[in-house]
Image (cartoon, grey):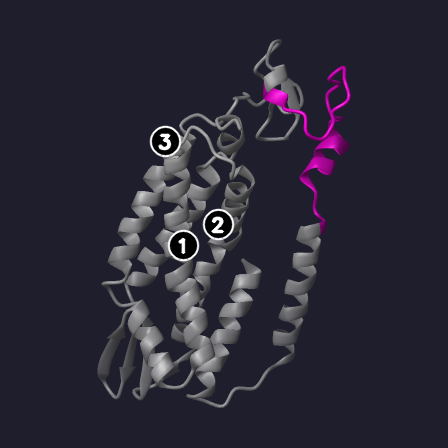
Amino acid sequence: MVDVFLVGVLVSLVKLVSLVDVSFGGGFFCFIIFVIFYLLAIQKYNVGKIWNFFEPYPNLGFAVKSGMIGYKKGFYACHTCNALVDIKQSHTCPRCGSHVHEVTPYSNIKCLVLSISALFLYVVSNIYPMMITTYLANDTPSTILEGVIVLWDLGSYFVAFVIFFASVFIPIFKILVLFYLCYITKRVKRTKNKRKLSLLYAIVEFIGKWSMIDVFVVAIMATIVQIGNLMVIYPGSAVILFSAVVILTMLAANSYDCRLLWQQYKD
């Protein structure tokens, strides 16, 4: 989450400018360069090539072509190394030894349970304070929405938008989409939107970590703003609850097997 942390640092600096004089050291620019090269390295990383380097792709006896439906021919894709496995011979992947299923067992139930847990914790996290500001010995707790409103009233529109998007819109969007995917997988028997649903699932997987921006901002502010008896910032109890929401939604997205969208629904 180094890219998320970098955005959290930038948002924190915008908030700190209104309190103290901020100057950028060499370490800050080195960290930006590190994040750029790290993200480029992640994009170049290919798990399939690593597996093929250590263990060549199993010989299937026929050429794999784009558009072929493997499970109709008795072949399932291994979720660990992505190799095609002939289930007529064995349900064990010959490359990595994992047990191969048509779809991950109880995928829908796991995703639904984790999503419900995330929804409950998200509601609770909006009740308790996310951050407590002590100014001249007076404590001012603020929830997620209250923090967004205060930033907007202070004229920090960009910061308010970033916090609202990361801490309000993204969690609600992820949970609603996961509920929808669980519902449509279980109830709908026929659909022509398999590609769009797969894209929607990919978006949920991608944006899952970005809700941590608010958590990083609170952690940075609580670490830096310790101005004696004048002003001190403490993290509230909602930080732990909201972090749990982010983790649960990420686990829910990873638990959902998107092969359900392609194997259960036949046009």
Residue shown at 26% from the left, 68% from the top = 129
Q: Tag 2: residue type?
A: Val
Q: Nearer the viewer, residue 138 or 151?
A: 151
Are dots 1 and 2 in contact, CB under 8 Å?
Answer: yes
For the point 50% across and 79% down, which residue is it? 13
Specify whether 125 is left or right of 43.
Answer: left
Give the image quarter of residue 62: top right
Residue 16 picture location, percent across and down: 45, 83
Q: Secondary structure at mark 3?
A: helix
Answer yes or no: is residue 80 visible.
yes
What's the residue at 70%, 57% (across, down)?
40
Sequence-wise first label, 1 or 2: 1
Q: Is residue 131 visible?
A: no
Label 3 crowding class (10 Å Cα cut-off): few <14, some 14-19, many 20+?
few
- The residue pinned by badge 1 equals 173
Q: In the rendered view, tell whether residue 131 sits above or below residue 56.
A: below
Residue 78 among those drawn in magenta: no
The N terminus - image quarter: bottom right
